[in-house]
Amino acid sequence: MAVTLFRKVDYPLSKLVGDIEQGEIGLPDIQRPFVWPFAKARDLFDSMYKGFPVGYLLFWENANGNGFRQIGVGGKQRKVPRLLIVDGQQRLTSLFAVLRGASVLTEDYQEARIRVAFRPRDHQFEVADAAIERDPEFIADISELWRGDKLRGEFVEEFIARLSASREVMDRERHLLGEAIDRVYDLQNYPFVVLELSADLDEEQVAEVFVRINAQGKSLNQADFILTLLSVFWDEGRHALERFCRDARVPRADGRASSFNHFIRPAPDQMLRVGVGLGFRRARLREVYSILRGKDLDTGEFSEERRDSQFAVLRRAQAQVLDLTHWHEFLKCLVRAGFRSEAMVTSRTTVIYSYVLFLIGRLDMEADAFALRDAIARWFFMASLTGRYTGSAESAMEEDLARLRTISSASSFLSLIDHIVGDSLTEDFWNITLPNNLETSAARTPSRFAYEAALNLLDARVLLSNLRVSELMDPALNPKKTAIERHHLFPKAYLRTLGITETRDTNQVANFALVEWDDNIHIADMAPSDYWPLYAARYAEEELARMLADHALPLEWWAMPYHEFLAERRRLIAGVIRRGFERLCQG
């Protein structure tokens, strides 16, 4: 009979929460740092309330007593835990936080309470908000049930008294409401099945178990697997990634340099991809996971020496990836491409993979800084406009990196970048594909933001304004209302008078232009033939002609049939995008 490396133990929820509170159960550093969205915590309590199974938990008997952290924020460290959580951390964090009213860290590294509300009348769980707090039908925070401030009977009586002040509550309903609240209170006795791994397993074996059980579903991807390995073999590298990503979200209070920026709030797995791309010239993380475990991809054999040498490669690469000088020099490439903020970025993967290419060009090819900036700017413009990394991103990047494996000089690198860009932005793309892509009512499309980037590159003014598009798109501007708005050239109310009401028609990209918000308010629902002459009178003929050209407006557009206008303007917008890109190519 095969020897099992685990035993099955049944725990009531109250025992699990109590052991976490007393330090008997701890959290090892082989876990992802983020908690669930609060809605998932709500769904968890809903499933338990209905008596559904919510999955087993996997613990590890802690033999060495180190390398762990406790659930929650702000609590003092207690004794060395007897059991470490390997799988089920998100569920236990949510349960502990709600039952004890403890704070947790959100995805943005901010402390927050998970406040789950319950409506006894129809047994409904919700994430608490301001409206629910004011609604006497709800218990706005079920944590109060287990806090111990009141006896359960007192809590029920106070709830019914508060509800009775807003409406009549009959005796039978009082009984049913009390039963519903009792059922929530009794969730502390909900039974969990726990599989406890033997203390004889080492950290690498536990990490392997964690990977194997999650590989059967969709709860982890290959980046998570590699982050698990980092926690086992290079914990400071994992924490460096997390610090970099946390600092990218808000500027430092002391004014010191940080990774903060207006383009991307990266996740640790995304910055990991940059290190992998730079160090191993790989995009498929499945292969990198095997490499970092010390596997020879040709023979299939593992060795500690190979594992150590591959981690050394990743260490060197990650140090360059997280270098603030490299990071901010790269972000200048996005500005050079006409992009101004995260609002214009439709694919964070495009940003991440462009950073890989920038680092290869800067560090391995030693390309001239200004030539490299322009080349990566052209690359980012192309990749964003064509959606190069929005489908099979790993495969596309793997192909790009494969081309670079034979390149060893700056001139060859820059030539290859421009060759790929040229092959992507063909005459057919400019004249056929791009106008067709513009036939959409989607609010966030690559072609729309490429058009806005082109306006920045062309130093265009906002329509009917003396201010430049780039000035009003500056993310440093933070007025109460956005300084620039997308205005319906043919207002929706006016189109209704023409019988055009479908959103896919009224909200076409070609029906929008960038104006100052004050103008947008004043134009309101006026017909274009009424408002355009009034505003056009502000400008001399030459100024107005350039404004019409930059904003892709046909001559006498205000008098054109609507659908004819859309078709013509799509063609002209594509032309403006091309002009902007050609300006970028001029250096």
Image (cartoon, rainbow, N blue to C red):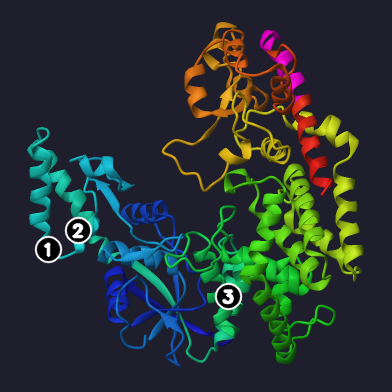
Q: In what element is the residue under mark 3?
A: helix
Residue 206 percent across, percent down from the top left: 55, 82
Question: Few, some or many C-alpha atoms within 10 Å of disc 1 (few <14, some 14-19, many ≥20)?
Answer: few
The answer to whether 471 is drawn above or below residue 412 in the figure is above
Q: Label 3 belongs to which residue?
A: 228
Q: Residue furthest front?
A: 540
Q: Residue at x 29, y 66 (%)?
A: 102
**Residue 215 seen in render:** no
Q: Label 1 belongs to which residue?
A: 149
Q: In what element is the residue under mark 2?
A: helix
Q: CA distance from mark 3 to mark 2?
A: 36 Å
The answer to whether 325 is drawn above or below residue 433 in the figure is below
**Residue 188 seen in render:** yes
Mark 3 vs 2, N-terminal side: 2
Q: Residue at x 40, y 71 (%)?
A: 193
- For residue 144, the mark is 2
186 inside magenta stretch? no
Residue 543 percent across, percent down from the top left: 70, 23
Q: Which residues are magenta?
A: 558-570
Q: Residue at x 62, y 35 (%)?
A: 468
Mark 2 vs 1, N-terminal side: 2
Residue 359: name its quadrant: bottom right
Identify which residue, 225 or 4, lies in the foreground.
Answer: 225
Residue 469 percent across, percent down from the top left: 62, 36
Residue 432: name its quadrant: top right
Cβ–Cβ under 8 Å for marks 2 and 1: yes
Mark 1 vs 3, N-terminal side: 1
Would residue 576 be found to the left or right of residue 236 on screen? right
Q: Residue at x 35, y 70 (%)?
A: 72
